[in-house]
Amino acid sequence: MNAPNLLKSLLVSLAGISLASGAPRPNIVFIVADDLGWMDTAVYGSKYYETPAIDALAQKGIRFTEAYSASPLCSPTRASLLTGQYPGRIRLTTPACHLPKVVLDPQVPKSAAPHQKAATPATRTRFPNDYLTYAEILRDQAGYATAFMGKWHLGHKPYLPEEQGFDLVVGGRHHPGPPPPGGFFAPWNIDTIPAHPKGTPIATAITDSALDFIDNHKDGPFLLNMWYYDVHAPFQTTQAFLDKYKAKVDPREKQACPTMGGMIEIMDTNIARLVAKLEELGLRENTLIIFTSDNGGNMYNSVEGTPPTNNAPLRSGKGNAYEGGCRVPLIVSWPGKFKPAIDEQSLVSTIDWYPTLLDLLDIPAPAEQAIDGVSILPVLQGEALERETLFCHFPHYVKATFNLPNTWVRRGDWKLFRFYADNEDQSDRFELYNLRDDIGETNNLAEQKPELVRELNQLITEHLAETEALVPIPNPNYRGDSHWQLSKDTRMVHGKDSFEITSTGKDPFLSTNRLPKGLKGDLILKGEIRSNAGSGSIHWATAKNPRFGPEHKVEYAFPQGEVFIPFEIPFSSDNPLTSLRIDPGSRKGQVTLRKLSLQTSDGAVIKQWLPTTK
């Protein structure tokens, strides 16, 4: 027996068995959508997407309004679901498990690129097999038949669901999205998904296998992990659904992506098939259905000129640790056992399902494996949940979403962010929000409540120590903060009074979201430039239109030459700006910017970017 399996056997023996007698064990269907935001179903407030099957689950179950994913990105959340541990404890904190390089012992580097204030931890690129998952416990200690359908994204072979307690696997490989070449529609070059006619949605294909699994195990008990690929990129739907949602208008004027509407409805239709099969076989009354998402809705990609979704009133989305990236839908339905049509405000997380399932089946937790979550069975049975705090450790820069490495703690209505090394002197910066009054995280109260900041920050310190999480450090190679993030075709060095930019491709740009709140009206971007990289443009985004698009763009022929030449670029926005982007060139070359500022039309300076050396 290999070492990981030997350890698992030891843990099982240490845990012991103490199952309740009498009532039959429930079947468990655990549905996880991919990138489905908190506001992406009708039952959670969408006026654009149609989700009758998901809505029906809520009518027959409990709808949680303050449920969180353990991370704003997928693989860390998936690992947390399987173990009940925070991603920081697992040290799997970004979705890098599709990459070929195997990293099992990540470290914090000693330095980082000159434009980054913090040196951030590496991440595991595989979910190790020596963790004891809830699938293994339910199979080995409670006699469950186990199946995994859909997205795994926790590693290449041998780091697969077959090694983590799932006897039947459909999909379940390293792919971050639906497998090629078909994406969301057949055919797929993967032997774990049965062949289907060309054009079959992947949600339909894996649901077909799920229905067969239920038929074959109707005498129960069974665990079905139904982790749909939907609604991750690539963004694809049928022409019929595309036409349907093109004809719709969101009265909130928030969600407007027909492709996403079709993707969500395809998934919803297949969830309806699952429920119908359970009802057909007389299993619904003894089946616990859990429905959630692995992180918030995607607001950084573009589909036909619009973001895939909008998480309003929450701030930001997938890949960012504000509420829009971590607050997710959660519906728990078990007719006859849990009261129907309940709205539940308890603070819960994906780390809670591992201990909850063990509690439900009266199975002791494994003695040698830490569990960070708490059982929410009391909440499901109508009682109060005893929870002091909840944490999220996401110590990474994410250019696409403007995320800065951070850890947050939530206690009651209060949520404190610690942004690592983000002050001018590379000390940690804090943001404090009262989510009861400010669900959109717009009013930072850190300066008004320093004692509360200190108190909550101490909780973060203790949490990081207890979980032995890898934590960013101040970057000794840092050369001054411009508050700008760079495209892959851009290299920038901070001089004493200038930005030295190298364009290495066709799409050089630098962008920032460090703008004064409420900034709008007639504005001017001013500076001096020395360039041989061609013409450029500026772009801006707003809360109403969070993507850089052609409607918020000004082309500008930056002067070319060997000396500095002043420039002024006027633009106007009726809505408050959330980010600004400068495309300083259109081809390979060198660009130097200095005296860069944002001003009002009458010359008042709103923002200056004056980098300094250390």
Image: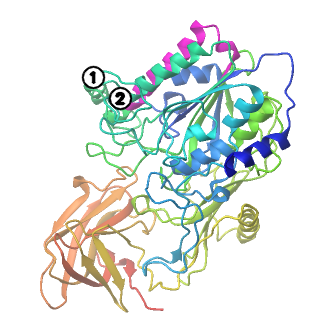
Q: Which residues are magenta?
A: 262-289
Residue 394 versus residue 311: which sits nearer the camera?
Answer: 394
Nearer the observer, 287 or 220? 220
Question: CB atoms at circles 1 and 2 under 8 Å apart?
Answer: yes
Q: Which mark is residue 24?
A: none
In this picture, is 322 found above or below 52? below
Residue at mark 2: 262
Is residue 502 visible to us here?
yes
Amino acid on which the number 1 mark rests in the picture: Ala
Residue type, mark 2 in image: Gly
Identify the element where label 2 is drawn. Answer: helix
Per the image, label 1 sits on a secondary structure element best described as: helix
Q: Residue at x 57, y 7 (%)?
A: 280
- Left/right of residue 337 with respect to residue 105 in the rendered view: right
Farthest residue, direction front: 1
Position of residue 270 measured from the top left corner of the image (x, y, whole percent)? 46, 21
Residue corresponding to mark 1: 240
